[in-house]
Amino acid sequence: MLEPSPQFIGRLERELAGSIGAASAHVMLSKVVSGSEVSLEEMMQMADETQQVIEYSQQLEKTSAELRSTARQLEDANAQLRELDSQKDEFLSQVSHEVRTPMTSIRSFSEILLDSDDIEVGQRQHFVSTIHQESLRLTKLLDEILDLSALERGERTWDNVPIDAEAALDRALAVCEALLRQRGMKVELGDRAQPTMVEGDADRLCQVFINLISNAVKYNDSDKPVIRLSSSVKAGNYVAEIADNGPGIAKRERKLIFEKFWRGPGGVADQGGAGLGLAISRQIVARMNGSLDLVPGPLPGACFRIRLAVMK
């Protein structure tokens, strides 16, 4: 009888190791090669130990996978925290800058009034008027910041109730009539929906429309400025669009327009606001389960679309 070669024994041991483990395979072949018998009890013990090793190995592999997943989640959480921290610092910096501007004017004119007794009545009135206007601007800024903060936290000071979206749009247009006349802005009315009921808040929706219309005035430097309003009901949604023939919004800036403190690069006059209007407007519409987006429009400038679900 031929003796098995070391190569054959090694190969057989590797084959058995895949089923009963390396240690058990080595012990079994060692006994067989030396002529010793391997009892059934020993075989069962080896199989049991092998099964325990396999189960333990599977548990280790599962634990290792869970640890890797947890580590990735922690890395993602840390990245989000760093991003939030960066956004917080940027937000506080912007708020500080925006507050400092009116405060500087208020302080400067107040000091002039306090230190000078020979100011002409007309000039004094001008300084007092400026202080008043800057105080109003500061108050509005703080109100907007608090409003946006509450909206971002998921808070709202209203309950969504059935409202007529068309009535809100008409009301906003009436409120902005003086501003449009002052600018000499032509108003084009496209197709209009019939009275349409949606769930929301009439004052807040009107606020959004007013903001979009006033922005179309502020950022339109055309010699013949035009604003176009249209509305319709499509696929169960009330859709309103406000477009203008101004310079539009550059492609690189379109992702920024709804960010806090973003302002357009142009404008026909002092724009006054802090760049919170669009951010607040989008949050308001979102609280009404709708959407506010910048879309291609019928005029060369910007076009904003509001979409709200029609009540059934």
Image (tube, grey):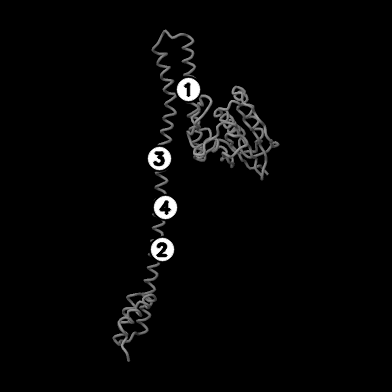
Residue bearing mark 1: 135
The residue under label 4 is which amino acid type? Answer: Gln
Give the distance between the C-alpha atoms of the residues marked 4 and 2, in whole angstroms: 16 Å
Give the distance between the C-alpha atoms of the residues marked 2 and 3, in whole angstroms: 36 Å
Give the quarter of the image for residue 39.
bottom left
Residue at image position (56%, 30%) is 215
Query: Which one is earlier in the sequence, the residue at label 2 or at label 1?
Result: 2
Query: Which one is earlier in the sequence, the residue at label 4 or at label 2?
Result: 2
Secondary structure found at label 2: helix
Give the distance between the C-alpha atoms of the residues marked 1 and 3, in whole angstroms: 30 Å
Residue bearing mark 4: 73
Residue 62, numbered label: 2
Secondary structure found at label 3: helix
Location of residue 81 with respect to 20 vertically, above or below: above
Q: Nearer the viewer, residue 299 or 103?
A: 299
Mark 1 vs mark 3: in front: 3
Residue bearing mark 3: 86
Residue 6 is situated, as x and y percent measured from the top left of the image, at: 30, 82
